[in-house]
Image (cartoon, rainbow, N blue to C red):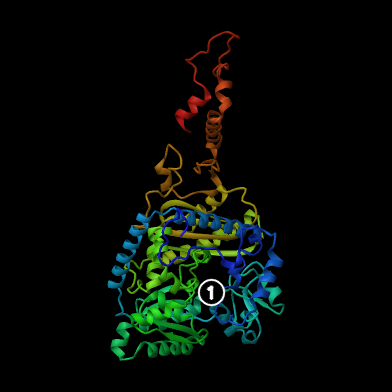
Amino acid sequence: RRVGAPRQLSGMSPEVPYEDAQRSRDGSQGDTAFIPGFINHKAGMAGVDQERVKAVVKELTRGGKHHREESRKDANTEESIAKMKEMYASLSATRIREIEGSVRCRIGEMEAQRDLSRVWIHVDMDAFFAACHTLERPELASVPMAVGGMSMISTANYVARKAGVRSAMPGFVAVKLCPALVFVRQDFELYQKYAAMLREVWRVYDNQFDCGSLDEAYLDVTEFMSRTGMDGGEVAAKLRSDVETKTRLTCSAGVAPTRRLAKICSDWNKPNGQFVLERSRDAVISFLSDLPVRKVGGIGKVLEGKLAAFQIRTCGQLRQSLNVIAAVFTPAVSDFLFSVALGTGTEQRPPDAQRKGLGHERTFAPTSDPRFIEAKLHGLAEDVAKELQKENLKAQTVTLKIKKSNFEVMQRQLTIPSSNAAKVISEASILLLRKERPYGALRLVGVKASNFEGADSHKASQQTVDNMMPTAVAKRSEQAFDVDSTYFCSEEGCGRNVPLQERQSHDDYHLAMRLSRDPSWEKRKAPRAAVGTRIGKKARRDRSQKTILSMLVKNKT
């Protein structure tokens, strides 16, 4: 123990270098820091030459916009890690004892709540988008194929994955890895047709199944097993057979006592396979021992990097380092990581299975053409509105998502009158977009509707168009927005929409406020006369006259 150093928490070695992706602080990490995101193995990528993928990605992206943006994010992560280490190093012996005691109590509570009575199946379609196209065009089955384009890939078939091509990879990188790659345009009507057929099958096993997306679902088959006398493995095999018979598509399944574990298991024997995890504590702990933390849903690149900074790369190492987790992470993150390490939680169906939001997004070649971008938003708003109407939902919040050509992602929200009309959602999203002008070239836009009428999800801190200004006019929020006759103020901290005929007075207000914040304003305004008053050099200012500033501040127009 070093003199003056705090006693080490159990499960933590004295030295905790950040070795994730072999980064260092010599300034070179920006070259390769983000590359691991492209080599994280998906099903069908077991034999991929990782070094070749790294070299190709580095060659094609180094110095580019994506590289700069990802390097910026990695720098933020490094800074956060440094603060965590500093906080850890500053722990007193008394605080360490308190943390260790609370961790023992928390582990005891979680173990007491462990529930092994349910059987969950997570079913995940194999390369769903690509498989749908292959059914329509059988000649694609034997060639490397990806759904998407040169900007971004949605998914790739298993032939392409052998060359390192995967979802969320730019198409120009994929073509370098696999020159024979064939691109296919996305066709959401086709995917929805097959997704509807899948739901008919899933409903037989659990009529309250939860969809994770178009091509995956969580099914609680405990009651089905009781009725049929089948075990979990038999149910999974029958379900997979029924899916293939109905759709001619294959899927993989994971069987486990919790939803989280079932999802991990469904990826174990992909494609067209299944994995069954026994319903016992020993089986769960053994399964997790060597499992990489990145395999767990909810642990992404950033959290993976923070854990790696403390030499935690597997769930087994995580379980041995829970004292450290409690010391350096927030209570919410710590609770999540505790449940991951112990294999507890998510045993029951979520108590609130209602939708929190509904949205769509599209990726395209970078463009700054406002007509193209707004047309995309309008189309997305129509898709969202159709689904809201189908589910008889009305949204009170619209969220705009944009990704710039430099891969910077921004989201903006707006409260609207409860509605599921395409016109209202479209105009609200376009207003949010126009507020960001000049937004430059964009490569992705998305529209999401949330905060559904009657739900308890409304946040008191949610900003509305009117309460961004000191003088809210609530009645204006009750009316649908007219894009062509509305001016959306882009002044920082404002964001109010006002009629075009009031734009000049509104801009004058902000001009006056800027002048009032300018340090030189006080020096300038004292010797000047009020508006409409002419006085001599030594004459006193007429206090009865109001300045532009005082009038505008008072009226707040």
The residue that appears at 46% across and 81% down in the rendered structure is: 266
- In the image, residue 540 above or below residue 251: above
| Rendering coords of residue 156 (x, y %) | 60, 77
Give 255 or 247, whichever is nearer the viewer: 255
Q: Residue 95 or 219: which is nearer the viewer?
A: 95
The answer to which image quadrant residue 74 occupies is: bottom right
Q: Residue at x 43, y 58 (%)?
A: 328
In the rendered view, does 166 fall on the left or right side of 355? right
Query: In this picture, is 212 found above or below 534?
Result: below
Residue sitting at x 49%, y 17%: 545
- Name the residue nearer the viewer: 329 or 207: 329
Where does residue 375 sit, x and y in percent of width and height?
59, 59
Q: Is residue 528 left or right of residue 12?
A: right
Q: Which amino acid lies under the numbered mark 1 shown in the image of this protein?
A: Glu
Q: Position of residue 409 (x, y in %)?
A: 56, 57
Of helix, strand and loop, which one carries label 1?
helix
Q: Quadrant of the N terminus?
A: bottom left
Q: Which residue is mark 1?
A: 189
Which residue is pictured at 43% across the width and 64% down the height? 388
